[in-house]
Image (spheres, grey):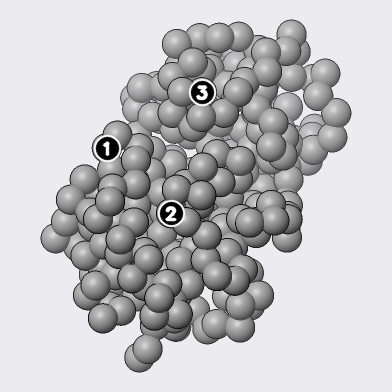
Amino acid sequence: MKYRMLVSDLDNTLLNNKSQISPEVKKAVNFAREKGIWIVLSSGRCYKSMLVFEEALGYAPEIQLGISFNGGLIYEAQTQKILTDYRLDRDLAFEIADCLKSKGASILIYQGGSLYAENESADIIGYRHSVLMPVTIIKDFHHLQGNISKILVRGEKRLIESFEESVREKASGRCNTYFAADNLLEYCPLEASKGAGMETVCKYMGISPDETIAVGDHNNDISMLRLAGVGIAVANATDEVKAEADYIADESNDQHAVAHIIYKYFT
């Protein structure tokens, strides 16, 4: 099988532990592009946060699509054109947010390219620094108009697991719930999954999912690993991701795993 596209998660996969693109990974991405391979970034991040890394990698000669908000939004990097934009119904979003707040959760809400919070807790400040996004502080989330892209909770693993359990029944069948990292809990529209986002990109590009390789580390990556012709877990991936992967890389994100994968499959 000749593979035509690589879809890679960002944090703890393509990015190293300093949230940077290493020179080794950038060199490998350029090597793949020179061979006509499409490189697609896929993340739970907002597309505006992802554009920083799109630019750092360098733009492809033609169209360069990305998968944002766990598949809820597909964008074109160079033009910043939005191709799909699924959102949570406003009433459902606030029902979940209110329940999480009642349990003491530190919540952020994305509405398109804007990020909102009701306070500046340590978790919210830490998240703002990690995603390179400004946060607008508002008195009450209910003042927001329109539907919601994503609800996010940041905190210690044991805490966010208890938050998820407390609203599980309320969210079940009404939205998608993801642990995007050990300290991140996210609520997204039912249409939003990285697998669904990858399928949209494949259709747009005229590429079969069988002709793709997907790489990830955390549980929100599982759907795209299942869809891909080859689903790869980096060495630092969770046990759940490794169990779903076709192949487990010997290298971690901090050992330039994506570069090794590119040379293994596209040389």
Q: Is residue 229 visible?
A: no
N-terminal of the pair, mark 3 or mark 1, is 1
Crowding near the residue tagged with mark 2, few <14, some 14–19, many ≥20 C-alpha atoms within 10 Å: some
Residue denoted by label 3: 128
Crowding near the residue tagged with mark 1, few <14, some 14–19, many ≥20 C-alpha atoms within 10 Å: some
- Secondary element under disc 2, as helix, strand or loop, is helix
Residue drawn at (30%, 61%), measured in percent from left and top? 27
| Residue 265 x, y percent position in the rendering | 27, 78
Q: Is residue 6 visible?
A: yes
Residue denoted by label 2: 57
Q: Are the residues tagged 1 and 2 within 8 Å (C-beta)?
A: no
| Residue most extreme to the left | 250
Residue denoted by label 1: 17
| Residue 182 x, y percent position in the rendering | 34, 34
- Quarter of the picture containing the C terminus is bottom left
Q: How many marks?
A: 3
Mark 1 to mark 2 CA distance (whole Å): 17 Å
Please state which amino acid type lies under the numbered disc 1: Asn
- In the picture provided, is 99 more to the left or to the right than 160? right
Q: Nearer the viewer, residue 109 or 25?
A: 25
In the image, residue 134 sits, relative to residue 85, either above or below, namely above
Q: Nearer the viewer, residue 235 or 38?
A: 38
Residue drawn at (52%, 60%), measured in percent from left and top? 59
Mark 3 to mark 1 CA distance (whole Å): 17 Å
User: Image quarter for residue 144?
Assistant: top right
Please state which amino acid type lies under the numbered disc 2: Leu
Residue drawn at (45%, 80%), measured in percent from left and top? 36
| Residue most extreme to the right | 145
| Residue 254 x, y percent position in the rendering | 21, 45
| Residue most extreme to the bottom | 1
User: Image quarter for residue 76?
Assistant: bottom right
